[in-house]
Amino acid sequence: QVRLVESGGGQVQAGGSLRLSCVAAGRTFMSGAMGWFRQPPGKERIFVASINFEGNGKQYEDSVRGRFTISRDDAKNTVYLQMNSLKPEDTALYLCAGAPRKFSASTYVPDYDYWGQGTQVTVSS
């Protein structure tokens, strides 16, 4: 059974940086697209970033483009989200997701079959 485990969240002041990690545990899994989503309190899950299975195709939500960078290290079964110039509106629960049926990056929640439990990011002004 595949399990995705996120880490790296925390509390940071506006303008600061965090790097989130997501490890796929249980078996070798990273054969498809991977993504990061976020869920602010009381709101629905929304797309943040995605990377294709080769690591050379990426998509970003407009508000994070230029500030966030997604990457993957398949040898470590890990996907990363480097977050710079953080803003209070970036505060949310950040979830990692895997789409083994997809080769290309995807913004579409139903494309993702596996989800982690999330790691909380809180940005204070």
Image (cartoon, rainbow, N blue to C red):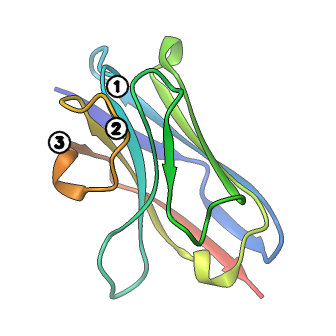
Label 2 or label 3, whichever comes before in sequence order: 2
**In the image, is residue 2 above or below residue 70?**
above
Q: For the residues marked 1 and 2, what is the alpha-carbon distance in whole angstroms?
A: 6 Å
- Circle 2 or circle 3, nearest the eye: 3
Say whether residue 71 is left or right of residue 15: left
Q: Secondary structure at mark 1?
A: strand
Image quadrant containing the C terminus:
bottom right
Say whether residue 32 is left or right of residue 91: left
Q: Position of residue 76 (x, y in %)?
A: 52, 17
For label 1, the crowd category at 10 Å Cα-Cα, with few meaning under 14, some 14 to 19 and many 20 or more, is: some
The image quarter containing residue 14 is bottom right
For label 3, the crowd category at 10 Å Cα-Cα, with few meaning under 14, some 14 to 19 and many 20 or more, is: few
Task: Please name the amino acid that badge 3 sits on.
Answer: Asp
The image quarter containing residue 25 is top left
Task: Please name the amino acid that badge 1 sits on.
Answer: Ala
For label 2, the crowd category at 10 Å Cα-Cα, with few meaning under 14, some 14 to 19 and many 20 or more, is: many
* Residue corresponding to mark 3: 113
Q: Secondary structure at mark 3?
A: loop
Q: Residue at x 60, y 83 (%)?
A: 89
Q: Secondary structure at mark 2?
A: strand
Q: Kindly identify which numbered label has been placed on residue 25.
A: 1
**In the image, is residue 77 above or below residue 121?**
above
Dots 1 and 2: beta carbons under 8 Å? yes
The image quarter containing residue 98 is top left
Q: Nearer the viewer, residue 11 or 94?
A: 94
* Residue corresponding to mark 2: 4
Q: Residue at x 22, y 45 (%)?
A: 112
Dots 2 and 3: beta carbons under 8 Å? no
